[in-house]
Image (cartoon, grey):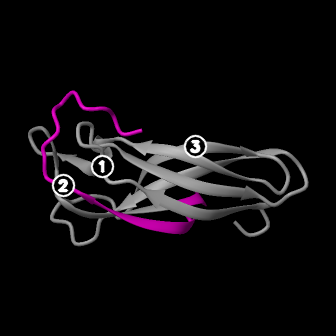
Amino acid sequence: MAGSGWTLEDLELSQPAPVTGHVKVRVRVRNVTTRQGMRQVLLYAERRLSSVQRLPRWPVGNALANAGPGSAVVVDIFIGARCFAHWDNGWTIEPGIFRIRAGFSADELTLTGMVYIGPPPLSNQSDLCS
């Protein structure tokens, strides 16, 4: 964010975990101010060419970065499998590529990564989208 004193430097995505379907996202954040501080990092998902009616972008996770002056920290954010699902008489996933975007606000998402989410259906007891 221009003028905020914080920058997003890198984003890494894991493949979905075999049992839970969770995706681990690592975001490196730098405090370029002269004071200790905290900044919220937001994650959003997008799915293009979807046969499912959904929002063009939806929130899937967040974390608070706490860094000293001039320091960079890495925050880990886990995206629950249900964040990629839709309701069709039960939670299910439309397999394909999902774009994950990170930023300090929904209007300024500066880092992007892609992850393939496979077809296994989710039980109704799966973790909530967090």
Q: Nearer the viewer, residue 124 or 12?
A: 12
**Residue type, mark 2 in image:** Gly
Answer few, some or many: residues within 10 Å of disc 1's Cα (few below 14, many 20 plus, some between 14 and 19). Answer: some
**Residue type, mark 3 in image:** Ala
Cα separation, mark 2 vs mark 3, equals 25 Å
Answer few, some or many: residues within 10 Å of disc 2's Cα (few below 14, many 20 plus, some between 14 and 19). Answer: some
Please name the residue that numbered disc 2 is placed on: 118
Depicted 69 relative to depicted 126: above or below: below
Q: Earlier in the sequence, mark 1 or mark 3?
A: 1
Answer few, some or many: residues within 10 Å of disc 3's Cα (few below 14, many 20 plus, some between 14 and 19). Answer: some
Q: Between tags 2 and 3, which lies in front?
A: 2
Q: Earlier in the sequence, mark 2 or mark 3?
A: 3
Depicted 1 relative to depicted 31: above or below: below
Q: What numbered label is drawn on residue 63?
A: 3
Task: Give the residue at x 35% y 41%.
Answer: 80
Q: Nearer the viewer, residue 19 or 97?
A: 19
Would you say the residues marked 1 and 2 are in contact, meaning their CB atoms lie under 8 Å apart? yes
Depicted 69 relative to depicted 7: above or below: above
Q: Secondary structure at mark 2?
A: loop
Task: Give the residue at x 32% y 54%.
Answer: 15
Q: Is residue 72 left or right of residue 35?
A: left
Cα separation, mark 1 vs mark 2, equals 9 Å
**Residue type, mark 1 in image:** Pro
Q: What numbered label is drawn on residue 16?
A: 1
Cα separation, mark 1 vs mark 3, equals 19 Å
Would you say the residues marked 2 and 3 are in contact, meaning their CB atoms lie under 8 Å apart? no
Q: What numbered label is drawn on residue 61?
A: none
Q: Is residue 75 left or right of residue 123?
A: right
Task: Give the residue at x 82% y 47%.
Answer: 68
Q: Is residue 107 left or right of residue 88?
A: right
Name, please, the residue furthest toward the left: 89
Give the magenta range: 102-130
